Image (cartoon, coloured by chain):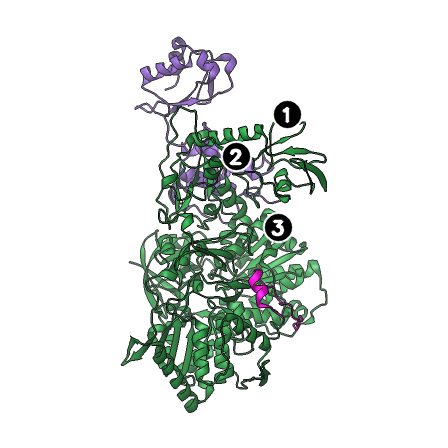
Chain colours: A purple, B green
Amino acid sequence: MDNTIGAAGGAATGVAATDMAAGDKSRRLKDKIKVLKKLYPHTRSVLLPALYAAQELYGWLGEDALEAVSRLTGVPSAEVKGVVTFYSLYKTRPMGRNVIYLCTNVACFIMGANTLEEFLEKTYGLSHGETTADGRFSLVIMECIGACDKAPAMLVNDDCHFNLTIDNIKAILDNYK
Amino acid sequence: MVKLTINGQEVEAGRDSSILDAAKSVGIIIPTLCHLKGLEPYGGCRMCLVEIERVSRLQTACTTKVNEGMAVFTETEQINKARRAMLEFLLINHPLDCPVCDKAGECLLQDYAARFGGSEGRFAEGKRTHPENVNDPFIVRNMQRCILCARCTRMCGEAQGAYAIAVTGRGAHSFVEPFSGDKYNCEYCGNCLTVCPVGAIMSRLHRHSYRPWYVEKEVETVCGFCGVGCTTHLQMRAATIIRTLPKLGTGVNKGLLCVRGRFGYDYVESEGRLKTPMIRVNGVLEPASWEKALAYITTHLKDIKLKHTSKAIGALASGMCSNEDNYMLQKLIRFVIGSNNIDSTARLYYAPAKAYIEKIFGAAATANAISDIEKSDGIFVAGGDPTAINPVLGVQIRAAWRRGAKVVVSGQPGGLGNFINYDLNSVPRHEETVLNTIVIGLAEMKGYSGKNSYIETKIKALRVPCEPELRATGVLLENMEEAVDDLSGLKNPVVVIGPALLQSGIPSKNLFLVAAIAYLIDARVYLLSRKANYRGLIDMGCVPESIPGGLPVRPGQLRLKNGVAMSVPSEKGMNLFEMIEGACNGSLKALYVMGENPIFNLPDREKTEKAMSSLDLLVVQDIFMTETARHAHVVLPAAAWSEKDGTMTNLGGRIQFLRKGSDVPTGRSEWRVIAEIARALGMSETYADSKEVWEEMTQVSVLHSASEYEDIKKGGLMWPYGSVQFQGGAEDFGVEGLEILPAVHHHSSQCSTEPCKLSLLPERSLFHSGSTTRKSKAILSVSPEPYLAINPIEAGRLGLRNDDTVRVKTAKGSAVVTVKIVIDCPEGTVMLSNTFEKVNFNALTGYSVDPVLGCMVLTDNEVNIEKL
């Protein structure tokens, strides 16, 4: 079988994290990835869950987090960055405590997602990619999240909310402090 | 084979070939943007769409395999429409800034838009914008021009194995970026530059200074930076190199280059180049005419020979000069003056290692095609990082790994770090125990073939390391066992040996152990060579012990075709170390140094300086005023690599042709000057060109006797150059300390007690090859300053951070330098390169000569580091 970068996992060189302050996070990430590695045939496949784990530990995926994932999975850092920037559920900058992922794709748009977008702008001063001054909410405008039958829809953190209207969205968001 | 028709023409193609290749084989060219031979088919640009009978939609010719009876059409109205549409799509976001784009004139997108149309877009939306990035020293990224063909990322990953860039983002907002998003901080091979079909990735070196149609002349030549001998093309305008370009798929490098070869050539146009000969008058070097300088040399050589006989005269040959230059120097010293005192810095490692390996295995042992590495199923590396010393050879190891080969590296893996499965990185001085364990393991697994009783007896005499000795190595036993398993199963193995194997510990023991591995698994051996022509100069007889062609020195006469006899002197010649010693004690009076800088390139600088200043005549022929030239009585300007015709022999024994791009500004290349001196001393031959020098050499050298200059010109000649193979080999050889293993220190957490002793080792940097690269502005822009590389653990112990200033002190000297924390630096060591004038490795260390191999062993390299 041919060899692939990252297939066998981080090779020998990943000895020590250079920044000692990040050592703790890096150690905890190492343990998590060790568990994840057992679930997949190739270490390379661990990349996506490893990134979620790093996101949870580091808060968002900055250079130090990506480098740690690269070192621990053996996937080259440039490629890790390519993957992270492809998917919109990875946070490539610091974000608020709660992230609203609002879908504005065709079905949601027809069912009034644009009015929801306006509502968020008016009520919280939020537009795409921004965070409220108090750090409570960040907004990410999404392409389809796969809930067209219950449009318009959004995700808040990991929770799905369907059939949104200007009248019910406020009450939903009030649950997130 | 499969039969199909393309545009009605019958074509036969291999079962696995694509429609694109099948069409090409009969001269039908299908336009492509993302396709590149040597990389996996990608099918991304959709330019190669073709119509296939009974297939309803257009198919990409690059990814569709041929089928029996297939009828393919490549030029129909539907296809033209599709191509136009594809180009229109690509141009939605392309800025069409051709007037200010360096690529204009050799841009595939421009060519196709001109040919197929599609440049008038119907999209009213604005184009995406993305600022041009000019922060990198070498590479300018203009991602507005990018068409996302991914040639660069595939080249970087699949071919180079650097994985430094990737497509980031999504959809129309995808861009190619390095991890930092800014500077590349990569190996800077620049292979992404070769493959970008548009002006998205461009070289910063000739930004806005050049147009493809400025090229007046293009010559195919061989890169002069290291022993791989990559084929490269010089694009010339007047006497200036506009750029060096590899041609994909050609040469031992198959179109890849490294940072030195691609960007480092500007040293030839450095202002520091010597312009005239110089003679020392009243202690000062003053410009002089060629006539005066050569007359000075010949008079003094005659004088010295008369007073002290020819054994007081010697020469140092050059690994950067051609075979012809080196042959002529050898002829002057050996046949004209009558002394065997000729050697070079190949003596430090390359020549002794080659001689030792050939003694064990025969003369053919180290002559192996570099391109075979890629086809190997397993590679064992010891003694240095091939991706830094001989970068393109290192890339071949990575390529082999991608195809499933096992890569086993003893020591720091460096640039092979991503290509190994386990670690054999031992604590310094204990590498020997690891090698010993592997040899014993392999001997058990593979048994003895009985082919070579000398080596088998010695393998049997090895002692099995005991538990504490194994533990002291710092390498897991299971890793050593895995290495034995991997190596023992190989069918087509390769062993790569680097200079670090011989520089410390017991060189003969280390080299013997690696040779034993090669013997047990029946591997081909490659010796890394930092300089381009070390192998060639040995073949040209620039060693005290053998004449051109490698036959040992035996007093007698060699007769040329024209009847002229040349005598081989009987007196045993002095090697490099003996000449230094001889100059100090007065037995050597004159030294001719061609393209070499011993004061800079040898440890124990003080001693070499003393030697050079004790001579009655020191002639230095070089392109720069080097440290050694400053001590010379006569300095002669030389031709740079791009200014001479001739041949070079790469580390695998392939002779290749070096073509000049421009003439030497000072008019005379090395061998012509040396021939003039030789004639003044009684030589009768004259030479019109380098070919005549070569042809004379073939009459002296048994090895080259059947070689034809024209064959070398056409594309290189592989060992043994058509001559009868003289096998030799299977001689007995010496090994020191066969049964001894490195002592185990019980306080192996060495630095728990103050003061901590670290060893200073040479850093063999990817970016620098020594004297020439420090004159390259381009290379200096990426690696401008010396630094002391230190492992993070040692740095922690010493309380050092990046960019701290420290004083490094050894028994031989001290230097002030900044610190760089490098994970790849082994524990217990610090590293310093030998590149920069003020702070260099060789000024801080000493050396001794190994009694068995005659190579250099580092001494006095224990350092104290004091934070300033």
Type of amino acid at the residue the image marks with label 1: Ser
Closer-to-camera residue (B666/B34): B666
In this rendered view, identify the residue nearer to me: B663 or A5. Answer: B663
Give the Cα separation between the discs numbered 3 and 1: 42 Å
Q: Tell me the amino acid under the disc marked 2.
A: Cys
Q: Is residue B528 above or below residue B141?
A: below
Q: Is residue B724 shown in magenta?
A: yes
Magenta residues: mostly which secondary structure?
A: loop
Q: Are marks 2 and 1 on the same chain?
A: yes
The earlier-in-sequence mark between 2 and 1 is 2
Which residue bears the numbered disc 2?
A: B45
Residue at image mark 3: B405
Please provide percent x and percent y for residue B620.
Answer: 39, 74
Q: Does the magenta segment cover residue A109?
A: no
Residue B352, by quadrant, is bottom right
Quarter of the C terminus of chain A within the rendering? top left
Return the chain for callout 2.
B
Q: Are marks 3 and 1 on the same chain?
A: yes
Q: Disc 3: which chain? A: B
Which-is-in-front pick, marks 3 and 2?
2
Q: Amino acid at mark 3?
A: Ala
Q: Secondary structure at mark 3?
A: loop
Q: Residue furthest bottom?
A: B307
Comparing B770 with A122, the one in front is: B770
Under tag 1, what secondary structure?
A: loop
Query: Which residue is under mark 1?
Result: B56
Q: Which residues are magenta?
A: B706-730
